[in-house]
Image: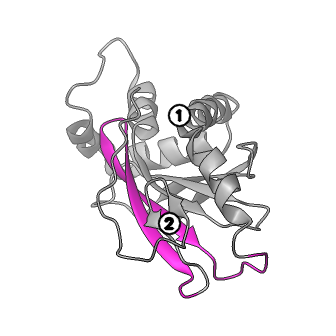
């Protein structure tokens, strides 16, 4: 459960714009969408910063975003606990896991080559899902401030477990989308 941090690309902007962790310099007066990357569980996760619906002061968002980014590991830990609880309570995550196991049948074993044989297939699948944060999108000014997308296998399924949090990392809901 490591959070390896790396910036894969930075844009060339002036020094007047805020320099945001993982994103580089961001000028949301000129553009409304930015991309970055972070390594989570030894997997590259995309980061999106979306100002399309932002109506606040162009500079108010940066400290809030930096605060959230500095707590990514803490928030991921809490999100993982919530996904596990949702699974155990028979919620959306449970339906997601069962659907994939039913839909893929024995082919799911290809995704679990190094799985712990003391765990059930459901537990193995769920454990793998928790390692697969595909994208985290940020929406400054929105109640659903951060959207965490977990995908078991983006090449074979467009099904996503989505976790919405507020700007303090409080989990608002867990959904299943495609």
Q: Which mark is residue 73?
A: 1
In which quarter of the view is residue 177 placed?
A: bottom right
Indicate which disc, 2 or 1, sits on the residue closer to the N terminus. 2
Magenta segment includes 133? no
Q: Is residue 92 above or below residue 54?
A: above
Position of residue 1 measured from the top left corner of the image (x, y, whole percent): 41, 26
Residue occupying the far top of the picture? 118
Which residue is at a point 55% across and 68% down the rendered structure image?
49
Tag 2, which secondary structure?
Answer: strand
Position of residue 32 measured from the top left corner of the image (x, y, whole percent): 57, 82
Position of residue 24 measured from the top left corner of the image (x, y, whole percent): 43, 63
Q: Which mark is residue 48?
A: 2
Which residue is at a point 64% across and 27% down the rendered structure image?
88
In which quarter of the view is residue 142 placed?
A: bottom right
Apparent side of residue 171 relative to residue 93 in the rendered image (left or right): right
10 Å crowding of disc 1: few (<14), some (14-19), many (20+):
some
Q: Is residue 125 above or below residue 27?
A: above
Residue occupying the far front of the picture? 15
- 7 or 151: nearer the eye? 7
Magenta segment includes 46? yes
Apparent side of residue 19 relative to residue 13 in the rendered image (left or right): right
> How is colour applied across the structure in the image?
one colour
Mark pair 2, 1: CA separation:
17 Å
Which residue is at a point 66% across and 67% down the rendered structure image?
139
- 3 or 21: nearer the eye? 21
Position of residue 138 measured from the top left corner of the image (x, y, whole percent): 60, 62
Q: Which residues are magenta?
A: 30-57
């Amino acid at each position: 459960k490591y959070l390896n941090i790396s910036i894969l690309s930075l844009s060339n902007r002036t020094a007047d714009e805020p320099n945001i962790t993982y994103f580089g310099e961001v000028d949301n007066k000129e553009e409304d969408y930015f991309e970055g990357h972070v390594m989570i569980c030894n997997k590259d996760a995309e980061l999106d910063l979306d100002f399309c619906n932002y109506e606040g002061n162009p500079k108010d968002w940066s400290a809030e975003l930096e605060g959230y980014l500095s707590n990514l590991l803490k928030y991921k830990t809490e999100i993982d606990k919530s996904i596990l609880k949702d699974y155990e309570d028979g919620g959306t995550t449970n339906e997601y896991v069962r659907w994939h196991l039913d839909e893929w049948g024995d082919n799911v074993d290809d995704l679990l080559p190094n799985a712990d044989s003391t765990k059930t297939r459901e537990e193995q699948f769920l454990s793998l899902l928790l390692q697969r944060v595909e994208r985290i999108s940020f929406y400054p000014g929105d109640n659903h401030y951060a959207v965490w997308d977990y995908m078991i296998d983006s090449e074979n399924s467009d099904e996503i477990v989505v976790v919405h949090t507020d700007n303090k990392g409080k989990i608002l809901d867990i959904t299943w989308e495609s």
